[in-house]
Amino acid sequence: MSLKEQILKIAKQAKQSSNKLALLSRETKDGVLKDMASNLEENKEAIIQANQKDLRLAKLKKYSQAIIDRLTLNDKRISQMADSLREVANLANPVGEVMRSWTMPNGLLIKKVRVPIGTVGIIYESRPDVTADCIGLCLKSGNSVILKGGSEALNSNLAIFKCLRDALIKHKIPEAAINLISTTDRKALDFLLRMDSFVDLIIPRGGEGLIRKVVKKSRIPVVKHYKGICHVYVDSDADLNMAENICLNAKVQRPGVCNAMESMLVHRDIAIRFLPGMIKKLQESSVEIRGCPVTRKIVKAKIKLATVKDYATEYLDLILSVKVVESLDAAIEHVNKYGTHHSDSIVTDDETSANEFLKRVDSACVYVNASTRFTDGNQFGMGAEIGISTDKIHARGPMALEELCSYKYQIYGSGQIRQ
């Protein structure tokens, strides 16, 4: 069987399974999810051993520290994967939920009801925990799923997938409801992206290059975000201690992810009081600062001059661009110009400024007095996320159960005919 035929078979069987998944009861789905969580915990050692193989190869290939961080599994991260599956199990079942109901003057009762999308393809790099999150969310929302992970995480993905598939088999749910394309042949992705008769949605998770490739080649609708150039703006009325804590967390806690701060904006009226201490703390955490001329004048430490390219760069590393701005308007203009509509935050005690920022910043997630690092399905109480979208149609921001559903109209009549 050729590679194209293999991918076609997977897509066809996944589509057939999606029809059965859509009819599963909440009790059945939740039981599978809880068994999946238990299987992960019971097989921690085997999963970590598989992950070590991937890490050794990654180090030989001299992958960046950010990639190695995303690739790494340990007891804590596997426990978090299991906990996430249990959280999804505890969430309400979205399938069949009546979103809206109304009666027309002619007596027709119309209901707008959530239904699964069908078959979802997930293309992802580096992060093996995505395997569990996506399978859990797709199962709960009644969708079959086809996973295509990166070769750098193949051993880890296979070990996790086996644990989850075993739980599916135990409950006598078709195995084709969850699928992992294990070949490292890059043509497999090209074939999958042409299966628009069987796959209903593609969600790419990874670097900008991967996402743009998927968008260019796919015949299937794609939900995505290209980059995460996230900002924190420290306003003239900010609590400066709070601002320090937020900025440090947003940049340092996990710099290699899409919701980390890449650019810090500071109002000119508090720049002299705020910047020296803030930049000292950032540099003590090994952050390289690239600042505007005003920043470099205020701060005595050696700082590179920020360029326009820096403001438009997603570093995914311990590098930060800093700019002093004249006003709230200038901050908002900068965010909308250089940002990627992902996550942006204002630190301020002024309610009017906060509301202006919330209304005018065109991003999927806009914060007041909080770190951008909260842009995550789990942190939003969704159990997990299948991805983050900066699109404006269908889904925006962290995507979870509701975003994995479409809807249909159910219309009840009593013999009405249109005149």
Image (cartoon, rainbow, N blue to C red):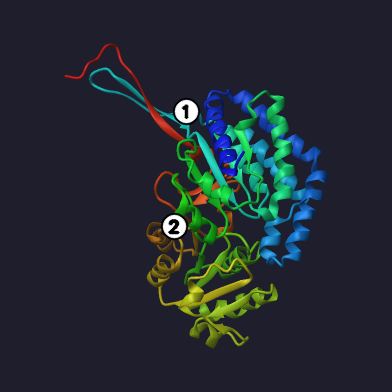
Residue occupying the point 53% across, 61% down: 209
On-image quarter of the C terminus: top left
Which of the pair 9/295 is nearer the observer?
9
Q: Secondary structure at mark 2?
A: loop
In three-dimensional space, the C-alpha distance between marks 1 and 2, rounded to whole angstroms, equals: 28 Å
On-image quarter of the N terminus: top right
- Is 319 placed left or right of 38 in the picture? left
Which of the pair 214/359 is nearer the observer?
214
Residue 206 found in image quarter: bottom right
How far from the left and from the top, in percent, is residue 389?
Answer: 48, 51
Residue occupying the point 57% across, 51% down: 187
The answer to which of marks 1 and 2 sits earlier in the sequence is: 1
Q: Residues within 10 Å of mark 1 (few under 14, many from 20)?
A: some
Q: Residues within 10 Å of mark 2 (few under 14, many from 20)?
A: many
Residue 169 against residue 338 in the figure, above or below: above
Q: Secondary structure at mark 1?
A: loop
Amino acid, disc 1: Glu
Residue 417 against residue 224 in the figure, above or below: above
Asked whether the viewer can see residue 383, the reply is no
How far from the left and from the top, in percent, is residue 287?
Answer: 64, 74
Asked whether the viewer can see residue 131, the reply is yes
How far from the left and from the top, in percent, is residue 45?
Answer: 83, 45
Amino acid, disc 2: Ser
The residue carrying mark 1 is: 97
Checking the image for residue 259, the label placed there is none
How far from the left and from the top, in percent, is residue 238?
Answer: 51, 68
Residue at the far top in the pictured view: 415
Residue occupying the point 53% across, 80% down: 291
The residue carrying mark 2 is: 363
Residue at the far left in the pictured view: 419
